[in-house]
Image: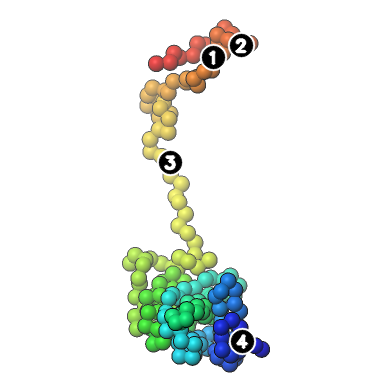
Amino acid sequence: MTAVGWLPADAEELFGPDATAEESYGVLTVDVPPDSWIPALEAARDRLGCTFFDWLSAVDEPGTGFRVTAHVAALAPVRRLLLRTTVPHEAPALPSAVRVYAGAAWHERETHEMFGVDFTGHPALDPLLLPDGFEGHPLRKDFVLAARVAKAWPGAKEPGESEHGGPKRRQMLPPGVPDPNEWGPLKGQLPPAPARP
């Protein structure tokens, strides 16, 4: 294999066996197996100079698992790297990246809360965004959204629809439309339309 993008060597040499790399739209993306997650992050920081941690999140890929992605960058010259791995739905767990990039702490908390991915070794995976007592992980594809309860409106929708027989809305002709009782084939056959105010 050959080096991709700005990588100085082959992806497997830099990030371990089974690592693959591709470049698209100026962004280099490296996929690694879950057991190479921390060594790959360390290689990005130490060997490639990607000292800036930007973000970490996940995507629920049905039938595949949770694709966890970290975006890191080297600042001089600017080079961006997306490092990805996939953990299975049955056991969504990865080692925490906090000891490699301290800024990953909040991102791992959010990813844990929204997707249910456990980051082993994280100092405190406390809830970050959801209210106390919230059950489930709302960004998972299998999360059932709270259905809006169909409930009848307590009042009348239109005047005169209520049971107590209030006044009905007057039927009015649009401006410029002649009264069909005064003009046309039904002239004189219909009850008179209410007068405009």
- Image quarter for residue 45? bottom left
Residue ranking furthest to the top: 188
Q: What's the CA distance linking mark 3 and mark 1?
A: 38 Å
Q: How many marks?
A: 4
Of circles 2 and 4, the one toward us is: 4
The residue that mark 4 highlights is: 3
The residue that mark 2 highlights is: 184
- For label 3, the crowd category at 10 Å Cα-Cα, with few meaning under 14, some 14 to 19 and many 20 or more, is few
First-in-chain label (2 vs 1): 1
Q: What's the CA distance linking mark 2 and mark 1?
A: 9 Å
The residue that mark 3 highlights is: 152
Amino acid type at mark 3: Ala
- Tell me what residue is drawn at x 59 percent, y 73 percent: 24
> Against 167, is 120 above or below?
below
Answer yes or no: do the residues labelled 2 and 1 have beta carbons within 8 Å? yes
Q: Secondary structure at mark 1?
A: loop
First-in-chain label (3 vs 4): 4
- Tell me what residue is drawn at x 45 percent, y 14 percent: 194
The location of residue 22, given as percent across then percent down, is 61, 79
Answer yes or no: do the residues labelled 3 and 1 have beta carbons within 8 Å? no
Amino acid type at mark 4: Ala
> Against 91, is 152 above or below?
above
Image quarter of the N terminus: bottom right
- Tell me what residue is drawn at x 36 percent, y 67 percent: 129
Q: Which mark is residue 178?
A: 1
- For label 2, the crowd category at 10 Å Cα-Cα, with few meaning under 14, some 14 to 19 and many 20 or more, is few
> Against 94, is 178 above or below?
above
Amino acid type at mark 1: Pro
Tell me: 108 left or right of 180.
left
Whether residue 107 is visible, yes or no, is yes
